[in-house]
Amino acid sequence: MIIALASPRIPTSLDDGLEQVRAMIAGAAGRDARIVCFPEAYLPGLRGQDFAVPEFNEADEARALRAIRGWAREHGIAVIAGMEHIAPAGRQIAAVVIDANGDVLGMQTKNQLDPTEEPNYVPGTTRRVFDVGGLTFGVAICHEGWRYPETVRWAATRGAQVVFHPQLTGSDTSGPRLDTWGAVGNPYYEKAMMMRSRENTIYFASVNYGVRFQESATSLIAPSGECQAHLPYGEPGLLVQDLDLASATGLLARRFAPDRYVEG
């Protein structure tokens, strides 16, 4: 199973973001990927950061979904589209899963918000796994995968071979310039990626924006907890990798025994 992790630059508008999505869907399909994942709330952009984000209403959401569904169908590739969802309760961060026929299979909302996100978003309340072309996967969005490891284990205990992790860490204007993946002096994010994989014996696929001052690279972590591949820091790009699904056994996740944690 070949997957792609798309790390585009910050969109300057909804149309600019859609054009980048279109190009990366085509690029991933051209390299035989079966599924491509985009970063957190990429359409229209994650609010509360150091860049402007355009308005995004229900009509914009519908237009973006129509376009992405058409490109998925045209190129025969499944898409995990990081975008905003306008729900009755308010604006949510979501990952919409679209299959290679252009059909929407469902969405995973961000249910554990970072405290700084609460002025702009409301949390979701449900979690699920998806099946696309023989790949079973879950989605944990940014803060969830960093600080709430149970969101990843939830999917792993239900058969997920990989958990996709749309995120945004870093800035396009200032910050550290990293040069060595997982270095001791780096922010903790890449160490967390390793643990989410190793503690569940599954793949962990973390997808960052292509900002200049990234605090973590777009990375694929193997079930052993080792970094299989990552994009260069600070550059937009497309990471295409082949998964050895036989190694994604979920062994440690399946050994989880919640009945042993009953208060005495």
Image (spheres, rainbow, N blue to C red):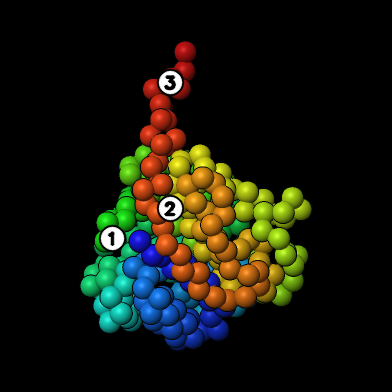
| Label 1–label 2 contact, CB within 8 A | no
Q: Residues within 10 Å of mark 3 (few under 14, many from 20)?
A: few
Q: Earlier in the sequence, mark 1 or mark 2?
A: 1
Q: Viewed as shown, does residue 66 lie left or right of 188? A: left
Which structural element holds mark 3? helix
Mark 3 or mark 2, which is nearer to you? 2
Q: Tell me the amino acid under the disc marked 2.
A: Val
Residue annotated with mark 2? 163
Which structural element holds mark 2? strand
Q: Quadrant of residue 179?
A: bottom right
Q: Quadrant of residue 109?
A: bottom left
Residue closest to the eye, 28 or 163: 28
**Mark 1–mark 2 distance (CA, rounded to whole Å):** 13 Å
**Mark 1–mark 3 distance (CA, rounded to whole Å):** 34 Å
Which structural element holds mark 1? strand
Count of numbered labels shown in the rendering = 3
Q: Residues within 10 Å of mark 2 (few under 14, many from 20)?
A: many
Outermost residue toward the top in this view: 264
How far from the left and from the top, in percent, is residue 128? 33, 50
Residue annotated with mark 3? 260
Q: Is residue 45 visible?
A: no
Residue annotated with mark 1? 132
Q: What residue appears at the point 56 percent right and 50 percent down from the top-left corner?
A: 226
Q: Viewed as shown, does residue 235 lie left or right of 81? A: right
Q: What residue appears at the point 50 percent right and 69 percent down from the top-left corner?
A: 239
**Mark 3–mark 2 distance (CA, rounded to whole Å):** 25 Å
Q: Earlier in the sequence, mark 3 or mark 2?
A: 2
Q: Tell me the amino acid under the disc marked 3.
A: Arg
Mark 1 or mark 3, which is nearer to you? 1
Q: Tell me the amino acid under the disc marked 1.
A: Val
Q: What residue appears at the point 58 percent right and 68 percent down from the top-left corner?
A: 231
Q: Residues within 10 Å of mark 1 (few under 14, many from 20)?
A: some
